[in-house]
Amino acid sequence: MPHVPTEKNAAPLALTLRTPRKLGLIPLVCVMYLVVSGGAYGLEDSVRMAGPRLTLLLCIVVPLTLSLPTALMAAELTALMPVEGGFYFWVKEALGPFAGFAEAYLSILYTAVDMAIYPVLFASYLSFILPLGPPAQIAIGIALVWLAGGLNFLGVRPVGMASIVLAGLLVSPFAILVIVGIPRLVHFAMPTPPLFGTDALGALGAGLTVVIWNFSGWENLSVVSAEIENPRRNYLRAVLIAMPVIVAGYLLPLAVSVSGSTTAAGWGTGSFSQVGYAIGGRALGAALALGGTVMSFAVFEAAMLWVSRMPFVLARERYLSPPLAQLWSTTATPGKSILLCCVAFTLLVPIGFVALVVLDVFFYMAALTLELLALLKLRNLMPDRAGMFTIGGGRPGLALIVALPILTWAATFGLAISAGVAKRDFILAIVLGAFVWPAYAICRRRYGGPPAIDPPPTSITA
């Protein structure tokens, strides 16, 4: 019988995590905003590849078919199991140890791509403001890694406070862009390029991939559930606040920028800055350009919060070296796990790693599928949900929540492959994904793996 986490049987690790430095609601909202979005940066490629009309449509559809179901799933399962390790334990409890390991393995694969590129992006954006050669860009990228790591060494509260400031810096230029562009919204003129061009399937597949990448990650902060104040209530509250902010943060600047546009050919990195310069002058254009630099650091330091906990959780589960499971007594943070992540990302910075969005989305959606299956299974295994948030609508509502993201994923890759734009990446993703079993066998043999009956290592009071 799967274990239902309670405060009593989770006492050992709950004591090691005793600290007043927990993430309150407002910092949680800001960290969630950064982990999922970080501003409208990133949509430019979708406009270029899929066109402005289709990108606008996808920014309405994807939140309904992917973001909302994922966010509600995360809120329900965090309320049920507010444990350090979050989605790893959801899947392990519902589907078994191998599925839990596969969840962690897939999560590490898709985050490795993202986390390696942000320091490079930071240095690249900064080079538009200051003349920097390649060695200087590498040095600055490495410095960003350790600055973000340092914030995480200090604990979850400093990360939360920094996220409030950084989220404000990111939102402000786009808010000004929208305010200055209100006439464009009031008299919105649909972009003249057609909804579908000559390569309709390729455009839809490419656009879906980019937009999914921009709207995903709602469950990631469940990994630090034990470091959140009242996670059973605040995770849902944070979702309800962050969701409309993020959707509006994509749709409104995009609508201002593409209103009346006649072509998408010039779209790419820096396009929002060009629009800001055109309608708000040099100051707004520069603020939006500088925002790209801020975004790179903000998303990196917020993501480091949960990414750095994955080695910690796997070490506690006896898949990795035991020292990675140690906590610093002063800040209750997994110092050696954070250090390992900093070293790994430092080694990746000089490579100039290019993010493969297809791989990102494939691994993320594969991991999300395991989480959705866990949602179904845990409804049957742990039916007592008195006082906890659960997704409404009965069985039909639950089936819809599970089906919509999986159908979105299938449609995305079906379209991309049929159009011939992602076959190589898709094959590479399958090959890398298949290595989960050898990795599982090696880690179990080397470190022992979790016992046959092994409750989640931590739980906290609601």
Image (cartoon, rainbow, N blue to C red):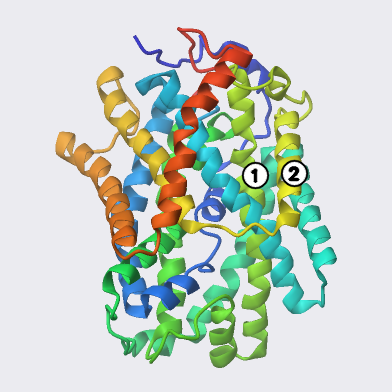
Q: Are marks 1 and 2 in contact (CB under 8 Å)?
A: yes
* In the depicted structure, whether residue 18 falls above or below residue 27: above
- Residue at 72% x, 42% y is 344
SS under mark 1: helix
- Residue at 45% x, 85% y is 265
Q: Give the image location of residue 111, x and y in percent.
A: 56, 46
SS under mark 2: helix
* In the depicted structure, whether residue 263 falls above or below residue 79: below
Q: Which residue is mark 2?
A: 149
- The kind of residue on which mark 1 rests is Met
Q: Give the image location of residue 381, x and y in percent.
A: 29, 18
Q: Nearer the viewer, residue 166 or 442?
A: 442
Q: Which residue is mark 1?
A: 304
Q: Name the image quarter holding residue 273.
A: bottom right
- Residue at 64% x, 44% y is 304
399 displayed left or right of 246: left
* In the depicted structure, whether residue 246 falls above or below residue 83: below
Q: Nearer the viewer, residue 320 or 184?
A: 320
Mark 2 is surrounded, within 10 Å at the Cα level, by few (under 14), some (14 to 19) or many (20 or more) other residues, namely many
* Residue 89 shows in this picture: no
Q: Nearer the viewer, residue 42 or 133?
A: 133
380 displayed left or right of 17: left
